[in-house]
Image (spheres, grey):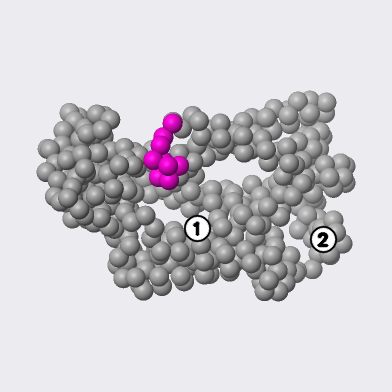
Amino acid sequence: MLAFEAPDAWGEFTSFGGTEGAGSGFSWIAFGLGTGVALSLIAQIGEQADYLRFMPARTEANKRRWNLAVLAAGPGWVVIGAAKQLGGAFLAFVALEAVGKAHALEPIAPQIEALKPWLGSVALPAAALFVIVSQIKINVTNAYSGSLSWSNFFSRITHKHPGRVWYIFLNLAIALTLMEMNMFAALNKLLGFYSNVGIAWIVAVAADLVINKRIGLSPPYIEFKRAYLYAVNPAGFGAMVIASTVSILAFFGLFGQYAEAFSTFIAAGLALVLCPLIAWLTSGKYYLARPNPVNGPHVEAGDITATHTCAVCETAYELPDIADCPAQSGPICSLCCSLDAHCGDACRKGGAAAGPVLMPVPVVRES
């Protein structure tokens, strides 16, 4: 609609100098601060990876479509994310003169102004419907993803798992608290602060996948089960903590104005360097506490969809979700392994219960 009704608006938008009188000339400080806010959304890539769990197996027949889907829904999400940010900023700019600076930042006001020329009085209900559907989608997605994150965190720390439904309520309580505290009024500052941690995390993960695995500093596969992992791997976790700490200090102005504006770049640069460096200094020894004899890279697993029955919950799980457990003298699923508070980590720390575990033959499903 804007392309027809306000064809010159995009040109005016690209030369817009802001509402604070800074002017339309390029500013490195403004660029750095704006980038910090924009890059806060980079952590969304973790949620995209969560969706990609539901991808079918990659085969010769579907590999082209499979690769395209993973690329588009994974790292390619940033292209869609950037387009959404530009579109939102453009709508706010178009609505600025009509509704003022305060209302232009609200989700619904720019939509109404953009729809008015064609929809007239129907613009309000149309924009309201769009915003409501968008907010429902956002909050359902965040409640789902957040419950998964909280569940994983607390099950590892407390060895208890009341169910993911309870963590949905925890997520909603946090969201309502932030809303009542009028978080929206300080959104730019909050996102700028949060991006220091989010970027340090995602760049440490990327460095591990792209650098460490390529040069052999980390295992050739990704292990997630407690039975084979140290409690803390300094290569990834250490890099993230150091990078985010330094960048947060920079964000609060400790190292000067330019370091404050580009604190997210400091987080990215430090994480990118520190993750391989720490892995090299520690010889990659903290990635795996012991080899995975169930479906590790050197195990002839055959059909990974074959199942074992967990010795604790007696539920059948496919091989990637099973570990060999000396304390149970048999297979255990990843969740029960995380929740076990009495095994004393015998599989990793040795002791009387440690030793090779004779696993039963997995059950192969009929196709």
Which of the two residues, 19 or 154, is positioned nearer the viewer here?
A: 154
Magenta segment boundaries in residue numbering: 154-162
Which of the two residues, 287 or 11, is positioned nearer the viewer here?
A: 287
Residue 67 placement, left or right of 31: left
How far apart marks 1 and 2 lie (CA) works out to 33 Å
Mark 1 lies on residue: 201
Vertical placement of residue 276 versus 37, above or below = below
Q: Please identify, in this view, whether the residue under mark 1 or under mark 2 is nearer the observer.
A: 1
The residue lying at 56 percent from left, 35 percent from top is: 170
Mark 2 lies on residue: 17
* Residue type of the residue flagged with mark 1: Trp
The residue lying at 84 percent from left, 45 percent from top is: 102
The residue lying at 21 percent from left, 47 percent from top is: 295
Regarding mark 2 in the picture, which secondary structure is present there?
loop
Residue 217 position within the rendered picture, expressed as x and y whole percent measured from the top left: 32, 67
* Residue type of the residue flagged with mark 2: Gly
Q: Quadrant of the C terminus?
A: top left
Which of the two residues, 248 or 307, is positioned nearer the viewer here?
A: 248
Q: Which quadrant of the view contains residue 213?
A: bottom left
Residue 275 placement, left or right of 285: right
